[in-house]
Amino acid sequence: MPSNQQETHNIQAWSLINRKYLGQGVRVKRFRRPKRSQIRNRVLLAVLMAKDIKLSRLAEDLGISSRSVSAWVYEGRIPSNNNIDKTCRLLGYPPHILFNEALIRQSPIVCQPTPSRFMKRSITSSPRSNVILTGLCMVYDFSVTDVSIWIGVHPGTFRKWLHSSHLPTPALQEKAETFFRIPRHILFADCGTL
């Protein structure tokens, strides 16, 4: 019996030592950081990231496997019409925006001139915000200031696009479309009719 109590004591001692050096637990990131070439449906991922919806939660809400939702985003698979309707109702966007087949097939990569980092403080809870454009900055880990410089607009102007759903002039829409390589009717879908 005494040797058994000693083993229990040793296990508890090691447990305390491990907690001290290893911390209280493992922190898991909300979204995995995929390589840019792996993302096929960037718009769907952008909406999910901006609304802070995990792929597994979307799958649970739709009643399907998380592997299926992952295939939509990373492999570019198009879901059944039933799942398209459910997803569009849940996220609040029409199918031609969330599941644009031409854009998914093309899957262009954005050229990043310099390293950049998205700041979480860029997300606001304003009632009117451009979820897709904000989400794309999150997907690519782009700073709002850096994107505005790369596009050639004032940072305050770009923030208006993000936080107030301000519709830019056609010339500025073209600059954003050229940089992100996504049609302007998708980039500025949150801004009303184009």
Image: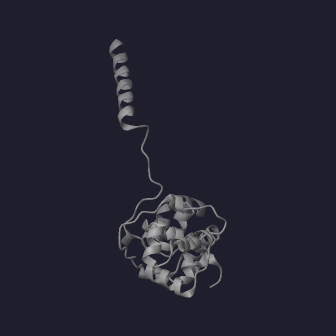
Residue 98 located left or right of residue 89:
left
Instruction: Single out the residue that lies furthest toward the top.
Output: 2
Q: In the depicted view, which residue is nearer to us: 111 or 21?
A: 111
| x and y percentages locating residue 52 in the rendered image | 55, 60
Q: Residue at x 34, y 22 (%)?
A: 10
Q: Is residue 127 visible?
A: yes
Q: In the depicted view, which residue is nearer to us: 109 or 168?
A: 168
| x and y percentages locating residue 103 in the rendered image | 47, 81
| x and y percentages locating residue 63 in the rendered image | 58, 62
Residue 28 located left or right of residue 63:
left
Instruction: Single out the residue that lies furthest toward the left.
Output: 3
Q: Residue at x 55, y 80 (%)?
A: 186
Q: Quadrant of the N terminus?
A: top left
Q: Is residue 77 above or below residue 54?
A: below
Instruction: Single out the residue that lies furthest toward the bottom.
Output: 170
The answer to which quarter of the image holds residue 53 is bottom right
The answer to which quarter of the image holds residue 93 is bottom right
Q: In the depicted view, which residue is nearer to us: 145 or 18?
A: 145
Q: How many marks?
A: 0
| x and y percentages locating residue 60 in the rendered image | 57, 59
Q: Is residue 94 visible?
A: no
Q: Residue at x 35, y 35 (%)?
A: 21
Q: Quadrant of the C terminus?
A: bottom right
